[in-house]
Image: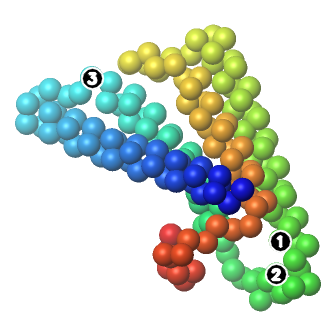
Amino acid sequence: MHSLIHRIRRSIETLLILSLLSMVLLTFADVIGRRFFNLPIYGAHDITEHMMAVIIFCGLPLLTSARGHLAVDLFDRFLMADAMRWWRGLISVLISLTLLLVGYQFALATLEASQIQEVSQELLIPRSYMYALISLSCLISALASVLPPYRSSDIHPEDAL
């Protein structure tokens, strides 16, 4: 089970890294083409929009599994006591249910987008694939929220993620 989770995590990290690199290179090429040659890349906005969604929703399961979401620690002294373990479990289940609901809604949006053949404005990229990625990401994040936190050996708990 641990090796499967590790392989899924590595796949998501690879997709995230490649998407970020592609978006940076595309933006760089578009700015150079626009400024120096008055020749922008056609469809750069559509591609950037889709890659931004890939980056955000590839990062969601990684962030959720590492428990890296923004947290206010005003009540940590009280809530991190062993007697409040049930509360932390309840919060994890509620987060998981919320992510499952979002994933379900995007699954419905995937079906609807494929039925009406919804596409992007410039390049006519089908939106159903992006909605499916978002749904899958939310479902993986829902699972990650109830599993034990993933702690990388190369990151100290006090370091920023």
The amino acid type of the residue labelled 3 equals Tyr
User: Of callouts 1 and 3, which one flags the residue occurring earlier in the amino acid sequence?
Assistant: 3
In the picture provided, is 85 more to the left or to the right than 112?
right
For the point 78% across and 56% down, the residue is: 95
Residue position for label 2: 79
* Mark 2 touches mark 1? (CB < 8 Å): yes
Q: Which mark is residue 80?
A: none
Q: Which mark is residue 42?
A: 3
Q: Is residue 123 visible?
A: yes
For the point 92% across and 84% down, the residue is: 83
The amino acid type of the residue labelled 2 equals Leu
For the point 84% across and 58% down, the residue is: 93
Q: Which mark is residue 88?
A: 1
Q: Is residue 75 above or below residue 147?
A: below
Locate residue 117: give its quadrant.
Answer: top right
Say which element carries label 3: loop
Cα separation between marks 2 and 1: 8 Å
Location of residue 138 in the rendering, given as x and y in whole percent from the top left corner: 68, 44
Q: Is residue 115 above or below residue 25?
A: above
